[in-house]
């Protein structure tokens, strides 16, 4: 699906692009999606502006109709740094619902289609890059390693409700090379705000990607088709904020399982459409496993009717 197809199908109101003087040929495009991030967005943008590089980069700042003052802060920065920031002001009518939940998918994919860099990096509006050499190191590594599609680094999880030091999370950030197969199968899942990758897919994004909540998971699997992922030791950990406003904190366990099930189904459809039957079969097994978890969850929650619905899908 190209950009024109995407807009024709999903754009109901024109997106306003703020006036800027950003170079037409940056080396890196940094995608920032923000919504209701008033307390964090300044720190996020400053962490990106503080990057020290010997190449040009652009910041694609997608503001998704916040009502808490986030939009005004984004406009302020776009006016101060017109040579760095491309600000996209989105309309609530363009939000794409998935499983009955309004998502930021339109914002994120609009940003993705708008990238002009050879490489892409992410920093959500409530996250923070702490290393001013992050981009320089990741781009140099990608340029020097043809087998890599992705580089990534460590992060610290910051719980806004706890008076404690940030905690490093390594479960899905193995300090090693992640092979293509493990990426495709989501056996490991580097955090989105730690990755930088070669921009090889933006002109033809799978339509299945639009219809999931876990867009990051779909993206990691997709990038696995283009190469491996390499961990970089020499980059300071970024901050990943976990707070009550985060989507996964607002959702119940059942909704999380529903979201995973949908992601696996869309990945199965995508890979079968490419003729990759082994990956289609793998995600079919993931679907079966998730249905089993849903059966158990529904029984424990006292909902035998829902449990029976999932059980029928196993037969």
Image: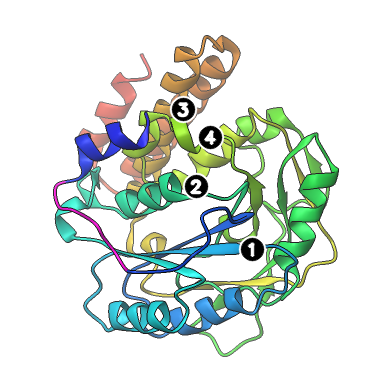
- The circle drawn on residue 56 is 1
Q: Which callout, 1 or 2, points to the residue nearer the camera?
A: 1
Whichever of callouts 4 and 2 sits on the residue coming sooner in the sequence is 4
Q: Eyeballing the image, is 248 above or below 300?
A: below
Whichever of callouts 1 and 3 sits on the residue coming sooner in the sequence is 1
x and y percentages locating residue 56 in the rendered image? 64, 63
Task: Check the image and tell me how it is coloured.
Answer: rainbow
* Residue stretch in magenta: 12-18
From mark 4 to mark 3, how far is it between C-alphas? Answer: 16 Å
Q: Eyeballing the image, is 198 above or below 194?
A: above
From mark 2 to mark 3, how far is it between C-alphas? Answer: 12 Å
Which residue is denoted by mark 4 in the rendering? 201
From mark 1 to mark 2, how far is it between C-alphas? Answer: 25 Å
Which quarter of the figure has residue 291?
top left
Which residue is denoted by mark 3 in the rendering? 267
- The circle drawn on residue 216 is 2
Whichever of callouts 2 and 3 sits on the residue coming sooner in the sequence is 2
């Amino acid at each position: 699906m190209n950009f024109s197809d995407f807009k024709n199908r999903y754009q109901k109101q024109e997106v306003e692009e703020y006036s800027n003087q950003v170079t037409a040929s940056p080396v890196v495009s940094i995608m920032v999606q923000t919504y209701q991030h008033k307390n964090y967005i300044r720190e996020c943008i400053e962490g990106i502006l503080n990057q020290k590089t010997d190449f040009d980069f652009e910041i694609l700042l997608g503001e998704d109709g916040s009502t808490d003052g986030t939009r005004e802060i984004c406009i302020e920065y776009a006016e101060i740094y017109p040579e760095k920031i491309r600000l996209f002001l989105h309309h609530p009518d363009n939000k794409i619902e998935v499983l009955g939940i309004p998502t930021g998918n339109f914002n994120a994919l609009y940003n993705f289609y708008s990238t002009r860099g050879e490489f892409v990096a992410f920093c959500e509006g409530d996250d923070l890059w702490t290393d001013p050499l992050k981009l320089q190191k990741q781009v140099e590594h990608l340029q020097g390693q043809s087998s890599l599609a992705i580089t990534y680094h460590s992060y610290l999880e910051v719980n806004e409700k706890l008076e404690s030091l940030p905690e490093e999370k390594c479960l899905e950030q193995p300090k090693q090379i992640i092979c293509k197969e493990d990426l495709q199968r989501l056996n490991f899942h580097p955090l989105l705000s730690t990755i930088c990758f070669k921009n090889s897919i933006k002109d033809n994004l799978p339509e299945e990607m639009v219809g999931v909540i876990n867009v990051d998971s779909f993206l990691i699997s997709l990038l696995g088709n283009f190469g491996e992922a390499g961990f970089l030791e020499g980059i300071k950990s970024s901050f990943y904020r976990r707070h009550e406003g985060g989507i996964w904190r607002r959702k119940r366990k059942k909704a999380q399982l529903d979201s995973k099930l949908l992601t696996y189904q869309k990945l199965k459809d995508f890979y079968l459409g490419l003729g990759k039957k082994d990956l289609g079969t793998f995600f079919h097994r993931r679907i079966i496993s998730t249905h089993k978890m849903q059966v158990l969850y529904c029984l424990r929650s006292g909902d035998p009717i829902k449990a029976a619905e999932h059980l029928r899908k196993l037969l």
